[in-house]
Structures are given as structure tokens and as C-alpha cells.
Image (cartoon, rainbow, N blue to C red):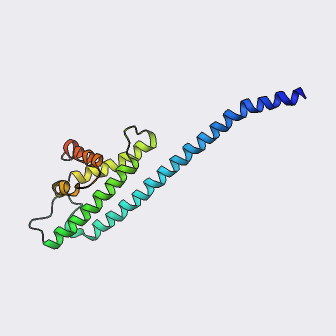
């Protein structure tokens, strides 16, 4: 009988910490999977956005040069809508993926989004439209992308 009682104490002493470890590990894995899924969904949205840009190739949004002036009203409107969609997507990525203490995979995921933001911030048409695009957007996101424009938006 003492044997069983000692064994039950041993199971309690070892089992409880093991259970806590397993639960914590499963929770961390679940969170990582959710973050990966969110990143995957955002990446798909960005790919769809790029298809939209390609279908509007006459706007030269992916070229290094700006569209020759003057733009027609229709070209201005399409460019504005596409830039608004892009800012909305970047803001969503910022809100979902960005934190001040990124590490590991989270840092890698965010770096890919930051690279895309920098690439767009280097485009004169986008930089020119940015103040209007940021009206009503998340304050922290607006501050972040304006800082990108200042620090890395004009370097090649």
C-alpha cells in the first residue's frame, strides 16, 4: 500500500510539470501555426494584388519610371484605387504581423513585407500619393511607412 501511495506522489510530482509543459508547447505550436496561416493568407492577397497590377500594365506601376504626365482621369482613378488597395493590404499586414520584439520566423515573415513596402516607397508616384492614402489609416502604421519613406524610400 505504501508502494502505491509513493507511486501516486511520484506521478503527481512528475506528471503535473510534464502536463504543463505539453500544454504550453501545444499552445506555442498553435500560435505559430496561426501566424503562419495569417502570413500565407496575406501573401495570397498580395499575389492577387500583383495580378491586378499586371492587368493594368498601362499604368507602369511596376516599372522604375513613372507614368508620363499628364495622366487621363481614368488612369488617375485606377492608379488611386490600386494604391488604396495596396495601402490597405500593407496596413493589414502591419497590424497582424508587426511587433517591436520580432524574432525567428516572425522576423523573417515581417522582413519580406517590409521589403515590399520599401520597394513601393521607392516609386515616386506612390510616395507622392502617400499623404492622401494615409488619411484615416492606423496611426502607428502611418508613422512606420512614412519612416520607411524617409530612411529607405529613395535609396536604390
Image height of 139 relative to 61, above or below: above
Residue 94 percent location from the top left of the image: 35, 49
Quadrant of residue 43 within the rendered picture:
bottom left
Image height of 25 relative to 84, above or below: above
Q: Quadrant of the N terminus?
A: top right
Taking the spot 28% from the left edge, 71% from the top edge, the residue there is 55
Residue 118 percent location from the top left of the image: 26, 49
Residue 109 percent location from the top left of the image: 41, 47
Outermost residue, left direction? 70
Q: Position of 154 compared to 107: left or right? A: left
Quadrant of residue 77 within the rendered picture:
bottom left
Q: Position of 12 compared to 114: left or right? A: right
Q: 5 or 100: which is nearer to us?
A: 5
Taking the spot 77% from the left edge, 29% from the top edge, the residue there is 10
Taking the spot 27% from the left edge, 45% from the top edge, the residue there is 144
Taking the spot 21% from the left edge, 60% from the top edge, the residue there is 63
Q: Count all numbered tags in the image, as a single digit.
A: 0
Amino acid at each position: 500500500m505504501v508502494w502505491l501511495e509513493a507511486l501516486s506522489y511520484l506521478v503527481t510530482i512528475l506528471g503535473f510539470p510534464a502536463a504543463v509543459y505539453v500544454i504550453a508547447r501545444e499552445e506555442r505550436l498553435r500560435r505559430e501555426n496561426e501566424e503562419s496561416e495569417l502570413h500565407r493568407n496575406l501573401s495570397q492577397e498580395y499575389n492577387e494584388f500583383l495580378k491586378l497590377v499586371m492587368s493594368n500594365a498601362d499604368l507602369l506601376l511596376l516599372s522604375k519610371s513613372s507614368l508620363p504626365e499628364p495622366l487621363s482621369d481614368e488612369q488617375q482613378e485606377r492608379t488611386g484605387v490600386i494604391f488604396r488597395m495596396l495601402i490597405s493590404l500593407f496596413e493589414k499586414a502591419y497590424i497582424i504581423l508587426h511587433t517591436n520584439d520580432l524574432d525567428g520566423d516572425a522576423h523573417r515573415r515581417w522582413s519580406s513585407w517590409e521589403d515590399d513596402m520599401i520597394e513601393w516607397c521607392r516609386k515616386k508616384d506612390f510616395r507622392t500619393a502617400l499623404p492622401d492614402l494615409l488619411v484615416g489609416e492606423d496611426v502607428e502604421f502611418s508613422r512606420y511607412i512614412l519612416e520607411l519613406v524617409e530612411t529607405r524610400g529613395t535609396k536604390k
